Amino acid sequence: MAHDTVEKTPVTLLGLGAMGTALGRAWLAAGHPLTVWNRTPARAAAICAEAARAAESAAEAVAANTLVVVCLLDDASVEEVLAGTDLAGRDLVNLTTSTPAQARVRAGWARERGARYLDGGIMAVPPMIGVPDAGGYVFYSGSRELFERHRETLGVPAGTTYVGRDAGFAALHDVALLSAMYGMFAGAAHAFALIRREDIDPASLAPLLADWLVAMAPAVHQTADQLRSGDYAKGVVSNLAMQVAGTPTFLRTAEEQGVSPELLSPYFALMRRRLAEGSGEEDLTGVIDLLVR
Ligand code: FVH
């Protein structure tokens, strides 16, 4: 078949943790020659049995191919591993989770060493890698040219979403989405706590909870629209005054059920502060401005 005869971009991969290994396997399965290195060499054995080539050192792995992908624990380990390598002329793609500021510094650091740089934020867990229907994708930011040059190769393990030349934007999008996820998990934890001592099967609450969260999720579009226009009362359905008036019911229910309000209280406090500023006719959007210092 024609696609089997097309030469695939060789990839160097530094880091064979759970995520690195999943990425490597996806490139191997798609026919990309793969050179790997991991601090603990034993972790490379399995993937090398699947045709990856193990380099003796990070420097040797970096020297092997132009495209160098890094997927290590954190930014400090990236610096440590790349310190002894020659990055001149390399296309460095860093899929290690970092902060936006760390990503920007790492981009400058890589440029000073003669490398082109692309940062990535992985929106997937290892079992989603290499599974096109799983919905996983990676945010990329930094060099647009680099992204375009390797778009096809980068698209092998998961979908790709380029979010801008600012190298910090991939990390920022990654952390923004994951922060919202933790907020959702916090809400779900409170909901389960409320029924914990009752004769209610958590498995019967779960689908109701999931459907409700899905039904409410599109509200973020209205929030974005209000933020863009600056009109926080635009299209408001349930205004802040009404919602603040309802908060004692939530807090009393928590007390009645013997549940700590510590997950809800900080958000309610922000709602009350915004109301005190005279924003009762607005949506909840004004809370965002209270958060931004
Ligand atoms: N796994 C996940 O669910 C998440 C999904 C979203 C993205 N994250 C990020 O991906 C990066 C790698 O995560 P991982 O799952 O592969 O993590 P581990 O299995 O813990 O492997 C860590 C690798 O990093 C190596 N390493 C750690 N410290 C050093 C160091 N000082 N010098 C050299 N290498 C280092 C470690 O090597 P070893 O312990 O096997 O010797 C592993 O290769 C991460 O940023 C997640 O936030 C994953």
Image: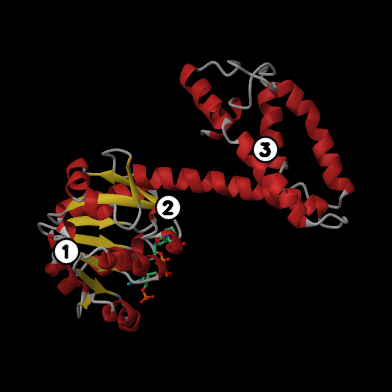
Q: Which amino acid type corresponds to the residue marked 2 in the rendered image?
A: Asp
- The quadrant of the rendered image in which ligand 1 is seen is bottom left
Numbered disc 2: secondary structure: helix
**Residue 272, percent from left and from top:** 71, 29
Q: Nearer the viewer, residue 35 or 108?
A: 35
Q: Can you tell which mark lies on residue 267?
A: 3
Say if 52 sits above or below 155 in the image: below
Q: Position of residue 2 (x, y in %)?
A: 15, 57
Residue 263 in sight: no
Q: Secondary structure at mark 3?
A: helix
Classify mark 1: helix, strand or loop: loop
The residue closer to the viewer here, 241 or 204, is 204
Query: From the viewer's perspective, is 286 left or right of 87?
Result: right
Q: Which of the 4 quarters of the picture holds residue 17?
A: bottom left
Residue 133, disc = 2
**Quadrant location, the N terminus:** bottom left
